[in-house]
Every structure is written in C-alpha cells, then in structure tokens.
Image (cartoon, rainbow, N blue to C red):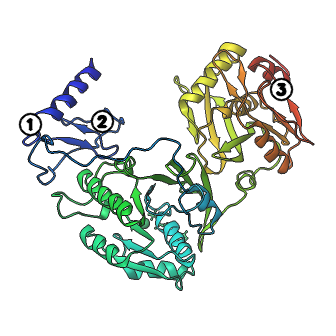
Amino acid sequence: MKAHEGLKNRHSSGTKGAMAKTTFSCSACGATHSRWSGRCDGCGEWNSITQDVPLSAGPAKKSLGGKRGQSITLTDLSTEETPPPRTLCGVEELDRVLGGGLVPASALLVGGDPGIGKSTLLLQAAARFSRAGVKTIYVSGEEASAQVRMRARRLGLEDAPVQLAAETNLRNILTTLEAEKPGLAIIDSIQTMWADNVDSAPGSVSQVRAAAHELTTFAKRHGVSIIMVGHVTKDGQIAGPRVVEHMVDTVLYFEGERGHQFRILRAVKNRFGPADEIGVFEMTGKGLAQVTNPSALFLSERGKPSPGSAVFAGIEGTRPVLVELQALVAPSPHSQPRRTVVGWDSGRLAMILAVLEARCGIPFAGLDVYLNVAGGLKITEPAADLAVAAALLSAREDTALPTDTVVFGEISLSGALRPAPQTENRLKEAQKLGFTSAIAPAGGKTGTVAGLTLTRPSDLVGFVGETFGAG
Ligand code: TYD
Ligand code: MG
C-alpha cells in the first residue's frame, strides 16, 4: 500500500508540472520525493528531507524534436582496449585500494566521518603523487592555505611540489584547473563547493550534486584525476557523500573508531579494480602510517586464553585478515535482554543465536549478549558466522578456546555449515601468524597447509560437540 503510493507520487512528479512543482530530496541518499516527510523511504534516514531549490532553467523544449544527430560508431565486446596507465604513489595500502594505482581522468570520492583523517590522508597522498611526477593541486574549501601548510610541515611534507589553494567557488577552481592542467586535483570537501548557477546554499543536495557533476565531467574531458572529499553527516543539515556515489568512478570510505588509532580505507565501488578491498592505516603523531600486516595488528592485544574470544580468519578484498572476535554473555537484569554488536551485523547475530537455540538446544533467553570485533574493523563476510558462534558459546560456557586455533565458515538456518571461499588463503595466513589448528566446514576446495591441523565439522551440532564437548 505504502510502496504503491510512493511509486505513484514519484511518477506524477516526474511527468507533469516540472516547472512549478516543488520537490524534496534526501540529504543522505539523494532520493527525490514529491512531499516532505519525516523519514526517507529510500534509505530510512530521519529528518534528512529538505526542499529543493529549483535548478536554473534547463532547455526549454521537452523533447529532442526531429533534428538528426550524428550516428555513433559501434564496437563489439572483443575490441581490444589498452589498460589505463596507472600511477603508483608508493603507499601500498592506498595503491591497492585504488585497484593498482591512480587511473588518469577518473573521479573519486573519499567519504568519512568528520575528523577521521580524510584531509590528512589526502595531503599525504598528494605529496606522494606529486613526488612520483604527477602535477598535483590541493584545493581546500575548509581550511586556509596557511593551515594546510602547517599540517604539511607537521607531517614533514613541506618540500613536496603540491600546489595549494583555498577556494570554494567552483567556477574559479575549474578555470584554474583548465589553465594549470594538473594530473591530479584534490577537492576538500565537496560540501563546501558552490556552483554559481545553482541557487542554493553550499552543502545542499542540489549544490553538492551540481558540483560533483561538474567536477566529474571536467575530469573526463580534461584528463585530470579528481579526488573529492565527502563528509558523512548524520543530521541532514548538509548532503552526504551518497548523493554523489553514482556519478564517480570510485568510492572509498575512510572508517575507524574514534578511540582506536586504526583507520580503514575501504573501496565500496571501483570501476577500475575490485570493490571490497581495504587498506589499513594507523593514525600517529606524524600522520597516517600504513599497516602492511593488519592481522598482526588486530591480534596484537591478545593475551592468555580467555572465554569469549575466538580468532576469525577472514578475507577483506583480496587479502586474508585475522581478527579477534570477543563475546560477553551475562544474565540480564532486563525483561528484554540486550544484544549489542560492534563491527558486525546485528541481524546476523540474532540469526546465529536463533540457530544455536533451535538446532543445538542452547538457549540465550534471559542473557545479555555483547559482541565486539577487535581493533575497530567492520566485518561483512558470512564466513564469520562460525567464529561468532564459537565466541558466543565460549563466553556462555565460560570455556576458553585454544589460542592457537582459527575459526571460519558460514552457518545456514538449518544448522548446516557451508565452506567459505578462499579457504586456502585463510589457512596460509593463519599458519604464517603461528596458529597451529583451524576449524572450518567440510566440503569445498581445500588445500592442506603444512603445520596446521584442520578440524572439519559438517554441521553446527558436530562443531559444538567437538569443540565444547557437549551437544
Ligand atoms: P583530519 O584529516 O583533519 O580529518 P577530516 O579531514 O576527516 O575531518 O584529521 C583530524 C584528526 O587527525 C585530528 O583529530 C587530529 C588527528 N591527527 C593526528 O593524530 N596526527 C596527525 O599527524 C594529524 C595531521 C592529525
Ligand atoms: Mg578535513
């Protein structure tokens, strides 16, 4: 009923009265609505819908008319295309997330919470690329040039041949870029830019969209790589980076917990490389340092065997990453027990709890359950299921798992276990870091890895029996 109404509204606003009709859009995802409402149907965000200011008059005629254009040359799929020449900046963690270096004439978006370190990362990247021979311009709309210079000095980058500007007027920026012909331009941030043909405040959906569109087209037309910074916003006052995600070639998110020094650069969309690739950095007093062996870092705080801890052998993008999962299970004083998850999906946790109860007869009713992924990493892989179950059971039974064991595998609703992709890579990483045994579902392709004992339960009941001694 509701969905149907929404469909009707969208339809009618698109076809008639485009001139006079006011429209509304969501500052979180950019979806357009014909009326205001408290919650966006598109992304579920509250209080993010604002009234659009109409764009300056577009073409007057509605249809293209009968005038003929030029015909386009068509090619087939097998036409050979030379791969784009890429520039490596030398920071391996960044180059890999970019899909193997920076592609000329591409438009990139780097999103993240304010204060997470986007400007720091991009200033460091700018310095690297300029030293690698790419003419680089850094335009800051948020900080004065002196501030950026001060940061550069602190990071020891003051001698890098980066050209700086503090400017928010898009027309001036594009004119300058056209004259200077850089190879890379960094725009920090897209929310501070304003195009003078759009009649609304910087940061509004229409401005952000227009500015991103201009910059993306400019990148393609003039062969400049443009990296835009986008702040993730929660309050809907300014438009978030999702508004421009579809326009750019590559979308990277810079994430991390405020209290942790780890920062993760994650590719969520990449037209020139694999998505889901991550780069791990550490925020230090001298800027961001790359972490080339994240598993060692995520496991570094582990000590003696403790109940509730399990090591998950995961894959992030193309790289195996070992990470500790921590669970705490305690009697609940509330009628509605708490389920709190950091770094994993709470719906998935509810599913694992339900499967443990229904298939293995292990109830969690009346118990508070907390689950944490150590180091501030966010895991999205279903292969983490079995490691989560192991951590939960270990916490519930107050029995520590052996510290030299890694766990992975997907749990299905029937209680069966499914093998995870890239099993061999996971096992190799575990072996490299000194683990001596692994628990992974039977079936699928596995190579044996020397020095690693493999336990292969076929279902969850078998796993519980083997690992905790009781069914
Ligand atoms: P910044 O890059 O300004 O964040 P963003 O552009 O995403 O808003 O980073 C700001 C934080 O980084 C600030 O809290 C201080 C910290 N920081 C360091 O810890 N070390 C450093 O060398 C620098 C430059 C910043
Ligand atoms: Mg910044």
Please tell me whether residue 279 is drawn above or below residue 159 in the rendered image: above
Please tell me whether residue 197 is drawn above or below residue 246 in the rendered image: below
The kind of residue on which mark 3 rests is Arg
- CB atoms of marks 2 and 1 within 8 Å: no
- CB atoms of marks 2 and 3 within 8 Å: no
Query: Where on the picture, by quarter, is residue 332?
Result: top right
Point out the quarter of the image occupied by ligand 2: bottom left
- N-terminal label among 1 and 3: 1
Q: Secondary structure at mark 1?
A: loop
Tag shown at residue 456: 3
Q: Is residue 412 visible?
A: yes
Q: Secondary structure at mark 3?
A: loop
Which residue is rendered at x = 49% and y = 49% of the image? 271
Q: In the image shown, does 346 or 421 lie closer to the viewer?
A: 421
The kind of residue on which mark 1 rests is Gly
Q: Secondary structure at mark 2?
A: loop
Which residue is rendered at x = 52% and y = 53% of the image? 81
Write down the residue under mark 2: 40
Q: CA distance from mark 2 to mark 3?
A: 46 Å
- Foreground tag (2 vs 1): 1
Q: In the image shown, does 373 or 22 lie closer to the viewer?
A: 22
Residue 276 drawn at (x, y percent): 57, 45
Q: CA distance from mark 2 to mark 1?
A: 23 Å
- Foreground tag (2 vs 3): 3
